Image (spheres, rainbow, N blue to C red):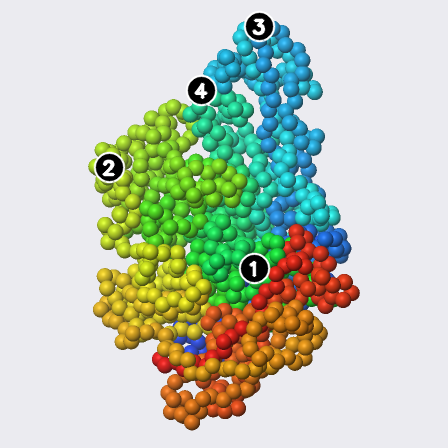
């Protein structure tokens, strides 16, 4: 081809290119202008925060645990679930295969990882891709990583030992005692001998002799024993033998046939690699065959017990601690090497190594494997029970999705309408603080789990769940993983065959068609609480003593209500903290006024007892006096840069590396920092640009620095537990979430540490917002009255600038309601005859269905439509009707209502106030009111348990595991309970 031809073609192509760009640009601009006009016309682009609050994005919507119980699923069930999740406002599923069944006999499913299972899995991947549903996969047939591929060598292990005493000099030839052996598995680590005197547990390290090479087959041992009394210590390792370290199929355990097996060795990279090769690569390949992908792999809650050894633990110990552990191994058998203090410090170093192995060899390596394969990683990396020593925050540092969990047990007998016990949500603050200090935008929680007699299944409605959600949000959680949804063949009928713990968020529940109202509430809260950064005045340093756990949110005595906080571990302090403008600052923008050296989980014994009991660990409330050299050097650096650090000086190193020189060096630097402070008469000292304070509480320091509480309300001093809050800052917006923790209507004045900005009140139930008309500003804070119904919440948002002396022109922020009319007399109710109800029934008064004599109403579950005709009194007073708004209040409802007036749909009501505006629908006379009321499945199921199987209307378990539902389970109040009233409202 000639150059001339090339030039000609280039010229022509360039002309075509220019023309094409012009055309495309014109089309693009035209389209963009059209979109812009349409958006401006609808007002959608004027306020992004408010618009997305009203209609949250998928990233703010809840995920759901999607259980494949016994792998008993069908393509029809998979498609139905995913389509319904998408339609109702759930944006992602976490697929978990297990055998945690709610019934008596296991149901047959397809073979785990067999061809049928793989085809169903591929179908799920394809459907998730089609529907734009996020899909994750739990890496087990249980919770954490376990199953048939795990060999004993790759299973959880513990250190065991046995000893014998001999007196020398003598030539010993015999068999050493055998340490504990679990399931025939045992390997020796070492044999040591050391002198003892008079039964003492004290050992001089110079007397310890390494004798491992003298140990022969079957424990035979030969040694020329020197003079003196000696202990021969044989140390090895075996399987842990913990109840959940080896899973069994239901009914002996909670997995399915073919899913049984050991939990992996969580201290071992090799164990994880082998497991990932077997399961991880399998599901990744199947997803690829389906033309889709897995968004994240998951490792669920740690419930498999403790472990203390892995094959290369000695090398791991030297890697993390910097010295050899051999000389100190007798400490694990109850002896003191050097002295009790040094031995205790070795034990802490040993536990610290377990922590580091779990964080790096398990969670860290799992993160690497997922990222290498183009997926995110998610974990419940903090328990919830019987865990080994762990640095949970460090675990979470290796997670893209950090998750805790909360339960709703004890609701029915709770005096205040729900169970406020912290034990139901003990790891939420820990999860949230991990997200804050490691720069994760979302903090997730397994939500609404329940397992208790006379409950668990279909016994709690959305209003029952709301106060638990609110508490979780105030702990810092900003996305839920709903617990749970069991995938079932539609042919099973309703309510179907379920997992052994609640709740059940599936298309089979009675209120599924109304569920978007509840899910939208959660999504709006989650969207707002994902904005910007959490606001906290204090970061408490947990110290270095294992275990490193953060406590739940509680009223910290030295801080008081109205201030919030985070917690830091050594890794965050060493690698992420710096100082900007006198505030301790993290790379992602989180910042704190004070860094407090708490050096324990909590100084409050009640709190540490709860946390320790929850995790199966001994947790001390005594503040540690130890600090490692790297940590104290970093503290000095932060103070020199301008930080305010609060706490007592350390008295020794937190590590045994370079002992005893390490203690001397720590004390030297401590003297440089604390100087002549004594924590009593001399409590504050400047150092560089910062200061060290010892002997004052964080609250005293903050108040002295002019930092008032971030949130307060009238009556807070007398009862700080009635309301709670959380605060986030995003650009020019200050976002407060405020909740009423009581089951009573409350009117209070609330004060927020913001001034110069107009307060707005946003309601996540309705998606509506108002500009506050009643407020005042004083001393850098804004106070406004809020009227809050039982368990209600509001976002109070400050964005738009106003004068710092501006105040509202009204006394109230909400319409003034006045009772206008009570709808008395009889109601007609229509029930669904398919579920045993009468086609029509009269209710002379509004009472619970359970108080009716007819079985078809008393035990009814489902939807009933109440109908009533009414006229407005004073209907001739048109002036009144034009000047005031009218509201219909249903009084009380069990459990969900959908209202229509004169054929106009007015919305779904699922929580207090059970009220809806009727201004645009009501007529002076001849009004036809229809209220669909939906209760829960429990009443019909409980009654059916008393009937022969062939007489039952519900299709579910013939008998419920653990008697969670039984013939004696109390019935739940149901129906429209009233009183039903019409109110006038004047702004």
Front residue of 845/470: it is: 845
Q: Nearer the viewer, mark 1 or mark 2?
A: 2
Of residues 698 and 662, the one nearer the viewer is: 698
Earlier residue among tags 1 and 4: 4
Sequence order check, earlier mark of 3 and 4: 3
From where the camera sits, is residue 10 visible? no
Q: Nearer the viewer, mark 2 or mark 3?
A: 2
Between 523 and 177, the one nearer to me in the picture: 177
Residue 169's mark? 3
Q: Which residue is mark 1?
A: 482
Task: Return the residue at label 2.
Answer: 680
Q: Position of residue 904 (x, y in %)?
A: 54, 84
Q: Which mark is first along the chain, 2 or 4?
A: 4
> Which of the image's four quarters has the N terminus?
bottom right
C-alpha distance separating marks 1 and 4: 52 Å
| Residue occupying the point 25% across, 51% down | 703
Which residue lies at the image location 64% right of the left edge and 12% below the top edge?
A: 222
* Figure check: 415 above or below 827: above
Q: Tell me the SS state at disc 3.
A: strand
Q: Position of residue 647 (x, y in %)?
A: 31, 39
Q: Quadrant of residue 603?
A: top left
């Amino acid at each position: 081809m000639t150059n001339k031809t090339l030039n000609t073609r280039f010229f022509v192509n360039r002309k075509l290119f220019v023309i094409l760009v012009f055309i495309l640009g014109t089309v693009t601009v035209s389209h963009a202008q059209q979109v812009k006009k349409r958006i401006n016309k609808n007002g959608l682009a004027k306020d992004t925060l408010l618009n997305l609050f009203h209609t949250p994005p998928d990233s703010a919507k809840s995920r759901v645990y999607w259980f494949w119980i016994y792998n008993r699923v069908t393509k029809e069930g998979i498609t139905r679930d995913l389509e319904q999740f998408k339609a109702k406002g759930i944006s992602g599923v976490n697929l978990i295969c297990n055998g945690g069944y709610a019934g008596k006999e296991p149901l047959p499913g397809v073979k785990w990882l067999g061809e049928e299972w793989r085809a169903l899995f591929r179908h799920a991947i394809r459907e998730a891709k089609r529907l734009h549903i996020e899909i994750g996969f739990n890496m087990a047939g249980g919770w954490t990583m376990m199953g048939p591929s795990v060999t004993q060598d790759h299973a959880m292990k513990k250190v065991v030992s046995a000893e014998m005493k001999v007196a020398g000099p003598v030539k010993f030839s015999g068999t050493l005692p055998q340490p504990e052996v679990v399931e025939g598995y045992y390997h020796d680590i070492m044999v040591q001998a050391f002198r003892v005197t008079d039964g003492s547990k004290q050992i001089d390290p110079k007397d310890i002799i390494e004798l491992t090479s003298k140990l022969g087959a079957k424990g035979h041992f030969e040694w020329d024993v020197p003079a003196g009394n000696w202990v021969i210590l044989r140390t090895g390792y075996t399987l842990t033998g913990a109840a959940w370290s080896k899973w069994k199929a239901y009914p002996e355990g909670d997995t399915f046939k073919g899913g049984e097996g050991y939990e992996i060795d969580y201290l071992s990279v090799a164990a994880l690699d082998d497991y990932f090769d077997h399961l991880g690569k399998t599901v990744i390949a199947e997803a690829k065959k389906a033309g889709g992908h897995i968004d994240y792999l998951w490792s669920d809650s740690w419930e498999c017990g403790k472990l203390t050894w892995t094959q290369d633990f000695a090398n791991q110990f030297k890697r993390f601690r910097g010295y050899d552990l051999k000389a100190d191994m007798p400490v694990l058998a109850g002896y003191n090497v050097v002295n009790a203090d040094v031995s205790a410090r070795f034990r802490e170093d040993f536990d610290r190594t377990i922590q580091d192995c779990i964080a790096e060899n398990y969670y860290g390596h799992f993160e690497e494997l997922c990222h290498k394969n183009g997926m995110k990683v998610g974990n419940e990396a903090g328990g919830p029970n019987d865990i080994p020593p762990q640095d949970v925050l460090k675990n979470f540092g290796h997670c893209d999705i950090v998750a805790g969990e909360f339960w709703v047990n004890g609701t029915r007998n709770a005096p205040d309408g729900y169970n406020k016990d912290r034990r139901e949500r003990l790891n939420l603050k820990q999860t949230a603080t991990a997200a804050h200090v490691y720069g994760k935008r979302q903090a997730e929680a397994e939500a609404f789990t329940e397992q208790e007699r006379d409950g668990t299944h279909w016994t709690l409605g959305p209003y029952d769940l709301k106060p638990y959600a609110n508490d979780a949000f105030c702990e810092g959680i900003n996305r839920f993983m709903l617990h749970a949804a069991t995938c079932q063949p539609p042919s099973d009928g309703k309510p179907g065959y379920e997992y052994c713990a609640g709740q059940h968020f599936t298309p089979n529940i009675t209120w599924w068609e109304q569920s978007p109202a509840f899910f939208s509430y959660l999504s709006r809260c989650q969207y707002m609480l994902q904005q910007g950064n959490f606001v906290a005045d204090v970061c408490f340093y947990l110290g270095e003593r294992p275990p490193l756990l953060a406590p739940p949110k509680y009223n910290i005595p030295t801080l008081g209500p109205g201030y919030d906080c985070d917690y830091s571990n050594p890794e965050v302090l060493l690698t992420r903290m710096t100082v900007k403008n006198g505030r301790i600052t993290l790379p992602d923008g989180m910042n704190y006024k004070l860094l407090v050296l708490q050096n324990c989980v909590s100084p409050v014994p009640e709190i540490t007892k709860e946390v320790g009991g929850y995790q199966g660990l001994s947790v001390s409330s005594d503040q540690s006096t130890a600090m490692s050299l790297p940590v104290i050097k970093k503290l000095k650096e932060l103070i020199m840069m301008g930080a305010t650090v609060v706490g007592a000086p350390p008295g020794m190193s937190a590590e045994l590396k370079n002992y005893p020189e390490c203690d001397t060096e720590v004390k030297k630097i401590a003297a440089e920092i604390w100087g002549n402070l004594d924590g009593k008469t001399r409590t504050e000292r400047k150092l560089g640009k910062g200061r060290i304070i010892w002997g004052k509480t964080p609250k005293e320091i903050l108040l002295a620095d002019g930092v008032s509480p971030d949130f307060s309300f009238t009556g807070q001093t007398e009862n700080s537990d009635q309301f709670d809050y959380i605060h986030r800052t995003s650009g020019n917006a200050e976002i407060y979430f405020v909740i009423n923790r009581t089951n009573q209507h409350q009117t209070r004045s609330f004060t927020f540490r913001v001034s110069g900005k107009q307060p707005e009140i946003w309601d996540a139930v309705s998606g509506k917002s108002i500009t506050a008309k009643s407020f005042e500003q004083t001393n850098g804070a804004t106070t406004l009255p809020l009227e809050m119904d039982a368990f209600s919440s509001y976002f109070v948002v400050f964005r738009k600038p106003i004068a710092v002396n501006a105040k509202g022109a009204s006394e109230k922020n909400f319409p003034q309601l006045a009772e206008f009319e009570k709808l008395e007399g009889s109601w007609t109710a229509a029930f669904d005859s398919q579920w045993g109800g009468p086609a029509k029934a009269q209710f002379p008064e509004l009472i619970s269905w359970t108080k009716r004599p007819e079985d078809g109403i008393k035990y009814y579950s489902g939807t009933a439509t109440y109908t009533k005709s009414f006229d407005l009194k004073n209907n001739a007073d048109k002036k009144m009707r034009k000047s005031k708004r009218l509201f219909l209040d249903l009084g009380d409802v069990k459990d969900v209502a959908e209202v229509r007036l004169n054929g106009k749909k007015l919305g779904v009501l699922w929580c207090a106030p059970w009220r809806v505006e009727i201004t645009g629908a009501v007529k002076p006379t001849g009004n036809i009111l229809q209220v669909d009321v939906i209760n829960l499945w429990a009443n019909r199921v409980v009654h059916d348990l008393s009937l022969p199987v062939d007489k039952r209307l519900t299709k579910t378990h013939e008998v419920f595991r653990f008697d969670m539902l039984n013939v004696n389970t109390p019935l739940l109040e149901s129906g429209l309970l009233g009183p039903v009233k019409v109110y006038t409202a004047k702004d």
